[in-house]
Image: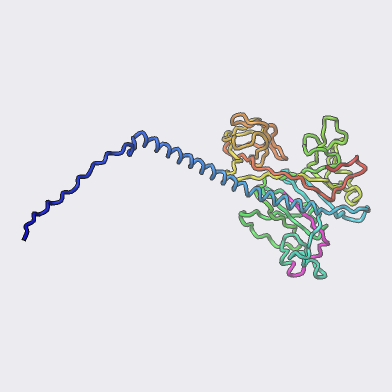
Amino acid sequence: MALTTPAPPLRPAKRRRRRPIPGRHFTLLEILVAMSILVVLGTSLMVILRGGLQTWRRSEARRESFDHAQAVILQLRDDLNNALAPPESPLKGLGEVEARLMCMPGAGGRTQLFLVRSLKAENEHPITGHAGSQIGADAVIDQRDDLAEARASRLRATGGEAEVAWVHGPGGVLYRGIRTPIGPPGSLFEPDSFELSPPPGAAPAAPAASQAGPQPALLRPFALEVIHFECLFWTQYTTTWSTKDPPLRNPRPSERPGPLDYWDSTRALLRFPNADPDVFHTFKAADSLTDPRDDIFPANVQVTLAFREPSPAGSSTFLAAPVDPGDEEIRVEDPSRLPAKGFVYVNEEWIAYEAIEGSTLQVSQRGARNTQAQKHEGSEEVYAGHTFSAVLEVPAWREDPSDGAGRRP
């Protein structure tokens, strides 16, 4: 048997040491630079998000005023487009004139607009469709228990016409009311012929004692936060909507006759004793009330609305110092939230200003827009609001051919 020598034991192979690859680690300076870049990017992102959030909040705060303004203007356009036109061949002495349009300042100088319009598709309406369904009906549609009276078949026939009232009430509430059939007793054109319904959120009033006779028509809130409501009327002498000059009958070359801020289609009720004879006015004679031959209607109506907006809308600030009725400079906290010139509303007073110098408003008129100059304490809120304006056509327009040549814009 052959002898063999054992094989030598296996030795592990030697591992080669790898040289470290340069650039695998960051220096302290590189780490600081990277952190600075991250901080800058994070801050920029926060600024962008904050700006976007502010834009969204401002737009959302203004959305409500846009919605309300659109609703008011659309309803006013519908009322004026359907205003009852005067007869083609009117006769005198036939009683109350049916086609009427009146606008005048009410309590606190706030605008009130009254007109007679035709009703559309009244048979399809759940209330007017029941009017005149029974002989001997004694109730009118006046937004007071109309549904109950319709179910009881108590509503009188409408005659296809209705009286409409727009009243700018206290607290920034714009009311609208309707009454049909038209005419007395209880007509909206009569003094104290309507009652304002409490606005939403108001404390409930004590129940009134039951009245034996008919109650006045009820006007309901149509829009809230309305701090200005104005109607201007295009006359047969008007050439511009600017109110710098009145509607002059014989203007100079440098004068441009403007609109009227009131209207009386009957030409018998609104009288100005010291009126300038060179300025066109609606009044003609007291006995013209029952004479429709000289009745006039405007060609167009310019409606201006100003809404009070929440603070995120960026259209309000605060007084920085008390203000007396005769002051011509008004200091405010943040003038950047106000337009460069225009109007501001402070506690039931409109103030016109022509410029802003620093934090001071340079006043051009105190007690503007039919308001009274008042004393204001410091820190009261100053509203510029958001203003909307629209020119609405009146298809029933009619001029007086005996009072100058008319022209429609």
| Residues in magenta, as a range | 150-167
Q: How far across and down, in percent of the image, does residue 164 sit?
A: 77, 54
Give the answer, above or below, for where 92 lies relative to 157. Answer: above
Residue 233 horizontal/vertical position (percent): 80, 43
Residue found at x 68% / y 39%: 350
Q: Tell me: residue 275, above or below residue 131.
A: above
Residue 323 location, quadrant: top right
Residue 331 in sight in this render: yes
In the picture, the quarter occupied by the C terminus is top right
Question: Within the magenta stretch, is there residue 163?
Answer: yes
Left or right relative to 331: residue 36: left
Image coordinates of residue 273 in percent, x first then y, are 84, 39
Lateral position of residue 368 relative to residue 237, left or right: left
* Residue at x 71%, y 37% (from the top left corner): 368
Residue 28 placement (x, y as % from top left): 34, 35
Magenta-span inclusion, residue 102: no
Labels in figure, total: 0
